[in-house]
Structures are given as structure tokens and as C-alpha cells.
Image (spheres, coloured by chain):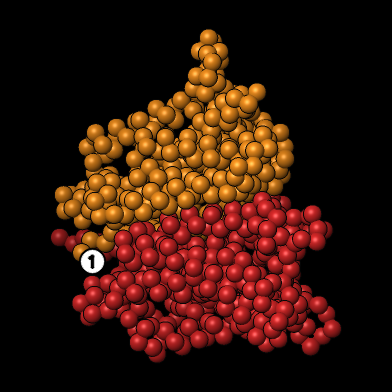
Amino acid sequence: MNSNIWLLTFADAISIATTLILASLGAIITERSGVINLGVEGMLLMGAVTGFIVADGTGNLWLALFAAVVVGVVLSAIHAALTVGLRANQIVSGLAMVIFGTGLSQFIGKPIEGDPLPVIIRPLELGWLSDLPFVGPVVFGHDVFTYLTWVAAGGASFYMHRTRPGLLLRATGDAPATVDAQGGSVAHIRWVHTMVGGALMTLAGAWYMFARAAAWNQAATTNGIGWIALALVVFASWRPLRAIGGAVLFGFSLQVPFTLQAQQISVLPPTIVAMFPYLITLAVLVLLSTPRARRLLGAPKMLGQPFVRDER
Amino acid sequence: MILLGRRVQVEQRMAVPKSAVVIVPVVSVVFALVVGGVFLALTGHPPIRTYLDLLDNGYTSFYGITDTLGLATPLICTGLAAAFAFRMNLYSIGQEGQMYLGMIGGTWVGIVLADSLPPLIAVPSVLVFGAIAGAAWIAVPAFLRARLGTSEIVSTLLLNYVALNLVNYFIFGSTGFFRDPTTSFPQGRAVAESARLSPMAFFTDKVTNAYPTLFVAILLAVFLFWFMRVSNYGYETAVYADSPNTARYAGMNSAWLQSSVLLVSGALAGVGGAMYVVGPAGKVDPGLLQVGLGYAGIVVAALARYNFLAVVLAAVLFAGLRTGGNALQVSNDPVPIAIAVVLQGAVLLFALGGELFRRNKVTLVRVQRATT
């Protein structure tokens, strides 16, 4: 029994990690272009509520996910218009997105509050694989999107580090003036990647709605997962593949407080355990700030800086 | 972009005209009301009547305006905290956590010391300890920023969650110092009566939710406005904000400037938390954590364009939207309170878009036919 609950905790951690990976993938792709979008939490909520409403009306999961993606593109396009187009402060615009997204999702979500889910994403049946001890529930007990997410992280990593557009993306985040001098369009690259990133964030919200949440419960539906995804970006030092490992670790520490409570283990109070992911991320952030690490794996150098050709 | 035979021409302005300082925020609010109105109409609520109700419940009725001023009090502090850091291009988003710490620090003094002190000393010492606790909470990010150049955005954000869990630990997770020992119900231990202020009555015999700490917040805003204008320190931070290199060549100490600005910002947010202790809460109160005044402070600061005096007005505007929204929710045609949040977000988005018009001259020019 005791080992069983820890097994479930671990399986749950990997499942929750799907949202974290998707959302932080979106943030990584956005930030690599030099744009920081702090609006993840608002985007997750908008994705979740859009997915719910569309699924409620049509009964079609794919249409719901598609609608969530469209909303993500539209919202992040507003962010791009403000920050890339009008050179507004990215931090403030991102926070405005959190507030706007949270408010709007609660407003349009009011009628469906507490309703049962119209569709549910269920784990795949993988035959004998799912019956394996330990590996079965932990690795083969998930839905198709969890696996697709892992593939997507691999794909994003390949794109960023092994293709020419990926090189341009990283260059735009590190040295936009160079990209500009080379004839690339900094604005174009930033627009596209901000919108792709936004789509991944709302998709993460929609998946969370159908796979993990019990009902639409206003802002408590995602309960701060968007902010954790932002911390995860730093933890993963802006690398998609590292986000998988980090997401599982974060997912685990999100689940452990419940397990400790259920088991009535009082080595550490759950509220203290809940601090761990943030403290660990802070430690990673400090390590990343040392001159040596900064050279090897630091943040995009021009993160948060608008690019203006005639000012350089 | 060509519209109806006219081309939109954008020219950079040399100086920002005085009128834009007023017009941009006003137009932002109007546009936000239009956007909110569309959503209201789509969901079957008459927009004009809803807005009139909002105005009444948030600003013009007696309890509306006093509730609004009460909520605006800590919001002014977090707004000042954000403005103080952001105008130096230091993007601390940790006001939320610093506010909780201010509440913890203020409560500690209120329990330990206040009993033996007269209110005239007890209340200020709660506020001062709130400020110290808020500054302490940003000390690590400030040090990292000044020494290692670590992004203060992420480090301050992370500490918000640590602070949130810390408060939950004190009240729900343990039965220690901050927990009320007289009951098994999880709530904070109350501070001494001498550390509390009574609500303002505004020359009536009614009990309001506004506290005299409002004047402390306004005085802080006026003081910062004056001090940053006349002092050497204000000048140095302004130079640094415009051009860090110039500041460095002029011999200014950038590590000191960065860390001191962040510490003061943390202290301001901490005062905001401590104001809850001398005012409505009187203890460490996790119920307060739902309010999100830290993040709202950043929005207020941005709307005020980091002008300390304008922060006061923006805070009252924002607080009114929230109290008005609360009242709408319980009226006989209930409108989700979220409409107030939608309006807040939309105001800010339009204000950001308004930057274009502040910084640039935008004119419509008749497209000339090409002549050969």
C-alpha cells in the first residue's frame, strides 16, 4: 500500500508535467526570440475555458483544442503587437495579459462553473505494457498528449539547435542587431515565435482542463501552474529537453504535499515542501548567473529588450 | 498602412507633449469600457446601466468610496514599490511576497512590543518593521542583481511563492508564534490593541473600511515625488535609468544604486502589508492573500507611468473597479465580478498601446499620386 501510493504520486507527477512541459515549451520558444511573456497563467486559463466552452457546444475534443490554440495565437499576437510592434514594456504587457486573461476567462466561464466536463482525455490502453510493474503506470499509463508533448520537446530542441531557422531564433534572442545586419527580420521572427509560444500555452491549459481538472473552477482551475512553468524555463536554462526532467521534478513536488498529508507523514510540513521547487529554481538561477555558467548556458542576452534599428 | 487613400505616418517625437500625459490614460479607460461593454452586451447585461451601477458602488456612494479608499491604501504602497523599481528599469515583481512579509514582520512587533507602548509609537513601529521585513525579503534578489547580474524578474517572482507558503505554514501548517493560541480554528494571533487604528468615520457615525493609513500612503507618495526630484540620489537613479554607462563613467556606484532601489521598493511593499496589520486584519491573515494587490500594484504603477503622485490616482481608480465589481456580483442582476478584472487588464493594454501616440506623432497623410 505504502509503495503503491508513492507509485501513484510519481505517475501523477509525470501526468501533471505534461501541462508544465507544454506551457514552458511555449515560454522557452517565446523567450528565445528575446520576448518574455509573463502572461502564461492568463493564457492557461483562457485555453482551459475556451476548450471547455467549445467542447460543451460541439462535443468534439479536437475542435476544442483547436479553438484553444486560436485563442492563444490571438492573445499572444496582442502581446507581440504591444511589445514588438509598439515596443511597450514586456513585463507590464505580460502582467496585463495575466490580468486580462484571468478576468476574461472567469467572465465567460461563469455560466459553466462547476458543470461536468463535456469530454475527458483518458489514458491510452497499451495492453501488456500498462500492466508492467512500476514502469506500467509510471511510463505507459498516460494519454496520447503526454507522449506527443515529449516528442514536441524533442522536436523543439532539434529545431532550436540543429536547424537554420532555429539558429536565427537563438540569434534573435542573443544579438538581434546581428540578425538585422544579416538581412533577417527581427520583428518577423519575434512575432512568429511569440504566437507559436502562445498557442502552446493555451493548448497546455486546454489539456489540463480535460485531463486533470474536475470542473471549471475559475482562477483556481490552474492554480498558479503558469507561474511554475515560468520558473521551469529558468530551471531548464531555456532548453526544451531539460524542461521534461524539470517538469517531472516540479510535478513531483506539487504532488508530494498531498501524499504526505494522505500518509500522515510529518517529517516536513506540506507547506514547507511546497516551497522546494521555487527554492531549487532560485538556486539554479544563482548558479546560472556565475560568469562561467552565463557564458555556457545563460538566458537569451537580449531578453526583454525591444529592438530598434536606428537606436543601435 | 493605407486607409481610405490616406497613409498612416508615424514620426518620432522629440518631446512628449503635456496633453498626451492626460489624454492617453483617459482614452485608455474609455476604450477599455467599450471592450468591457461588448462583453457585457454579448452576455446579456445592459452595459450603460452596469457601468452606472459600477460607478455608484465603487466611487460615488458613501460606502462605495470608503471601501475603495480602504482597498486603495495598501495598493498605493505596492504601486509606489513597483514604480520605484520600474523607473530604474529594475523589474521587481515581488511586491506580493514582500507585502506578506510586511504583514508577518508588522504582526511580530504588534504581538511582542506593542503591549508596552503607547499607540503613538506602537503603530509606527509596526509599519517600520513591516518595511524592514519587506526589504529583507528582497535582499537576496537585490544582492544577486547587484553582484551577479541575476535577473530580478525571476528571483522576486519565485520568492512570492515561498512567501505565500510561509504565511500558509504559519497559519495552517503549524501552531507556532503567529497562530491564535485561544482556538483550534486556524487563524492568526491578534496584535495588541495599541497597535491598531480605528477606521475613519468621515464626520459621520458610520463604520467604514477606510483607515487613517491612507494618509501615510499619500504622504509616502508625496515624499517620494519630492525627494526623487530634488535629491542627489534621485538624480543618480534617473541618470542610471537612462544610461547605465553614463552613470558608470560619471563615477556612480551602480551596485549601490541597484540594490538600494530594490531594497526601498521591498520596504514600500512591506509597509503596504503592515498597513493591514494596523488596519483591517490585525493579524497574519491568509484571507488577504486572495486579493493579489502585489501584482495589481505593478499595473497601477504602469498606468501611472511610474509617477508617484499619479500612482495614488491610479490606485483609487483600480480599487474602485474592484469594489464596484464586488457590489455588482450581489446585485439583483448579478454580473460576474470578473468584469472588473477584464476592465483592469484592458485599461492597461490600451495604456500600453497608447505609448505609440505618446512617443510618436501619428498623422494621416493623403497619398500622393506618383507623377512621372
Kindly indicate the quadrant of the structure image that contains residue B63. Answer: bottom right
* Amino acid at the residue labelled 1: Glu
Rendering coords of residue A142 (x, y %): 53, 24
Q: Residue at x 40, y 66 (%)?
A: B142
- 10 Å crowding of disc 1: few (<14), some (14-19), many (20+): few
Q: Which chain is orange?
A: A
In this orientation, which residue lies closer to the viewer: B34 or A292? A292
Which chain is mark 1 on?
A
Q: State whether residue B360 appears in this view.
A: yes
- Compared with B3, A33 (above or below) is above
Furthest residue to the top?
A128
Q: Residue at point 44% right, 44% down?
A: A232
- Residue A47 visible to the viewer: no
Image coordinates for residue B324, horizontal then vertical, percent: 70, 66
**Residue B339 vs residue B223: left or right?**
right
Q: Nearer the viewer, residue A139 or A186?
A: A139
The quarter of the picture where residue A158 lies is top left
Query: Image quadrant for the N terminus of chain B?
Result: bottom left
Q: Residue at x 26, y 36 (%)?
A: A161
Q: Residue at x 21, y 56 (%)?
A: A177
Viewed as shown, does residue A88 lie left or right of B136? left
The single residue placed furthest to the bottom in the displayed view is B230
The quadrant the C terminus of chain B occupies is bottom left
Residue A195 lies, in percent from the top left, at 40, 45
In the depicted structure, whether residue B290 falls above or below residue B22: above
Q: Colour of chain B?
A: red
Between A48 and A227, the one lying in front of the other is A227
Secondary element at tag 1 = helix
- Residue A186 image position (x, y, % from top left): 27, 51
The residue that disc 1 covers is: A311
Is residue A153 positioned above or below A238 on the image? above
